[in-house]
Amino acid sequence: MSKFIGLVRNEHMKTFRRLSTWIMLGIAAVLFITIAAFTAYYAPDDNSDWRAENEQQIKDYQQYVEEGTLEQSDVEGDIALLQYQLDQDIQPVQDNTLPAYMDTVMFYGSAFLIMFVAIIAGGMVSTEFGTGTIKLLLTKTPSRFRVLTSKYVSMLVTMVIFFLFFIGFSFIVGGIFFGFTNFDAKEIIIENGEVLNSNMLVSTIRDYGLNFIQVLIYATIAFALSTVFRNTALAIGFSIFISMFFPTISMVLSRYDWSKYILFNNVDLIAYTPGNTPPVADMTLTFSIVVMLVYFIIITAITWFSFIKRDVTA
């Protein structure tokens, strides 16, 4: 066991000795600060009378319906939310607050997180082939299975570190720009025709957790490509391509019932949280978990089998 931990530690040191890893963390930090600065500069004045604004907005919606500009079904949800805020005396969450900022970072930063982890995972094995160090690595350890597993575990540890950085740094930046307040801010949503409220900060942390599963799947795919391809640029490039474009392609295909069996239509578990809907109407959380598990087993089986049987002497 100590030898395996040593292998994981060695892989982890390789990852954080690379300048590219720190550049990605730096890009994320700049992104967070930029979002906070723009939000602080452009956010509307929060001293306005929100109750009067809600009442006026309800009247505007009702007028649009009477004039025939909008259908009642198009605005009844918005009216219900506005009225619920008035009845429960819940002030709308301002953009220039810590919970709203962290929610914005989660929305825009998740794509960067997937891409960063895909880049790291996509180069973990292919780099060894490219530099020729894979031969030396395999001669020092009795098991190829152990070598590949240590690399995968190291990738998981790196992914956790990136997640903690995203959550922690966004919390700190948001607190500096907007103050460590508004922890009780409420998010108003409609679920099955019923208006509900939840703590916005708690919901954002929950979404980060669900997003972890999505990143894990993309990282596993990138890791598999890194094992299959000897060329690092090809492995990383294809990993980025999959993480950026395959979800869009799957979403376009979601009009067809059979698309619910596509992996990329099942990885976003946030679709099953209150106020959201899955890509295909009859999909359930259990169904998506089972689909992901099946794909995960197939991908990892192919990855480990190909690595164990692969000729590295060429």
Image (cartoon, helix red, strand yellow):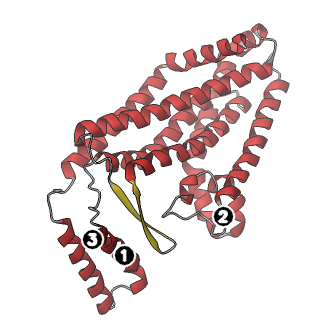
Q: Nearer the viewer, mark 3 or mark 2?
A: 3
The amino acid on which the numbered mark 3 sits, given as a three-letter code, is: Leu
Which quadrant does the N terminus fall into? Answer: top right
Residue 85 higher or lower than 46, as above or below: below
Callout 1 environment at 10 Å: few (<14), some (14 to 19), or many (20+)?
Answer: some
How far is disc 3 from disc 2 in space, using C-alphas? Answer: 35 Å
Left or right relative to 175: residue 270: right
**Marks 3 and 2 in Cβ contact (< 8 Å):** no
Q: Image quarter for residue 132? A: top right
Looking at the image, the residue that sits furthest to the front is 88
Disc 3 target residue:
86
Residue 166 higher or lower than 2, as above or below: below
Of residues 225 and 88, the one nearer the viewer is 88
Of residues 288 and 236, the one nearer the viewer is 288
Residue 307: image x %, image y %?
79, 27
Disc 1 target residue:
80
Disc 2 target residue:
283
The amino acid on which the numbered mark 2 sits, given as a three-letter code, is: Met
Residue 17: image x %, image y %?
50, 16
Residue 103 higher or lower than 53, as above or below: above
| Residue for point 76% across, 48% down | 294
Left or right relative to 194: residue 122: right
Indicate the secondary structure of the residue bearing disc 1.
helix
Residue 234: image x %, image y %?
63, 34
| Residue for point 55% across, 15% down | 13
